[in-house]
Image: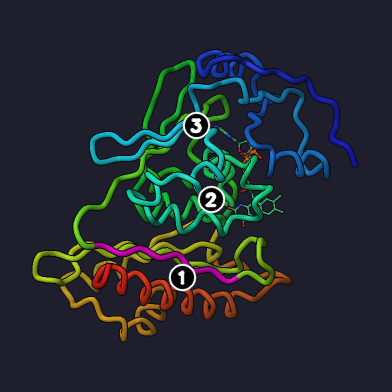
Amino acid sequence: MKPAAFEYHAPGSAEETAALLTELGEEAKVLAGGQSLVPMLALRLAAFGHLVDLRRVDELRGIEHRDGTVRIGATTTQSTVQRSEEIGRLVPLLAYATPLIGHFQIRNRGTIGGSLAHADAAAEYPAVALTLDAELEALSVRGRRTIPAGHFFTGTWTTALAEDELLTAVVLPVWRGPCGFAVEEFARRSGDFALAGATVAVGLGPDGRIDRCAVGLFGLGPAPRRARTVETEVLGTEPDQDKADEIGDLATADLDSIPSDLHGSAAYRRRVGAAMVARAWRRAVREAVHG
Ligand SMILES: Cc1cc2nc3c(=O)[nH]c(=O)nc-3n(C[C@H](O)[C@H](O)[C@H](O)COP(=O)(O)OP(=O)(O)OC[C@H]3O[C@@H](n4cnc5c(N)ncnc54)[C@H](O)[C@@H]3O)c2cc1C
């Protein structure tokens, strides 16, 4: 199938893009890498009268390390993220998650902002952003604003972005001191979206005990979520790999709204989710203790 007819726009700046989005209203849709939007248009699952392509907006691309954070422009491709030595060193969780996204052809075109704005519940980047308490920068004709990841992902494929708002960047904090990170997911075939997955970030204090912990879950609800019970429970304890199964069970015990479809029942996904948390816990703790 071919997409329904649309008018194509390629503005040269972020401000111009924001103005166009306001002018064109709900008939307009931003086009970034096209790896989610174009299949939806081609299958006629969606139709828009106007596509506003970001490819000429250079200011939305790039990676910048500043004041204990890494700021990544929205149209930075996933393969640029994957190749970045700076991200590997400063935001390892993002580096670990990137190769799990689709295939390299998709990562060559797909952008970090596109993945965050698309907000698929089973996608890796939204879970990483939520786990690391990232901040998302948005622009509209009303001005700029910053949205904490905890408020950004509002439901199935929905975010806090207004219809006329452009996501311009994501800002991720750099964790200092002994810390470890891991992402684990289960997909039926390599490159498929995960059935369930988990991210773990663990930081150790001077006494070697856990003083910082974040556990993210994806594919286990309408949006990525945090396992807050686990995060509180492990604070002040020894970083113990043997606790992994217990932590996996605790992280998934009280989840509601787990999807159930032909790929897997909610009960199955819960079990897979618990196993992914356990695996990610072991790897993150090993990295925090041994580097
Ligand atoms: C076969 C296949 C397998 C895939 N597997 C995975 C996977 O395992 N994990 C995963 O996470 N993803 C996967 N993807 C999706 C891929 O990561 C996409 O690149 C990503 O979801 C969207 O990024 P994009 O730049 O292509 O955005 P687009 O497709 O261009 O846009 C997606 C949506 O985001 C909006 N948007 C994009 N950029 C902005 C912006 N700056 N501001 C406001 N709105 C914006 C668009 O309007 C649109 O609604 C897969 C895709 C395919 C085709």
Taking the magenta stretch, the answer to whether it contains residue 116 is: no
Taking the magenta stretch, the answer to whether it contains residue 182 is: yes
Q: Residue at x 28, y 65 (%)?
A: 202
Q: Are marks 1 and 3 in contact (CB under 8 Å)?
A: no
* Mark before the other along the chain sequence, 3 or 2: 2
Q: Amino acid at mark 1?
A: Leu
Q: Residue at x 63, y 43 (%)?
A: 108
Instruction: List the residue tagged with mark 3.
Output: 167
Structural distance between the alpha carbons of marks 3 and 2:
17 Å
Q: Which residues are magenta?
A: 179-186
Q: Residue at x 75, y 20 (%)?
A: 8
Q: Quadrant of the C terminus?
A: bottom left
Indicate the quadrant of ligand 1 in the picture: top right
Q: Residue at x 55, y 68 (%)?
A: 196
Q: Position of residue 135 (x, y in %)?
A: 36, 40
* Mark before the other along the chain sequence, 1 or 3: 3
Question: Tag on residue 255?
Answer: 1
* Mark before the other along the chain sequence, 1 or 2: 2
Q: Amino acid at mark 2?
A: Gly
Residue 56 lies left or right of residue 275; in this view the side is: right
Instruction: List the residue tagged with mark 2.
Output: 155
Pair 3/2: label in front: 3
Density class for disc 3 (Cα within 10 Å; few <14, some 14-19, many ≥20) is many
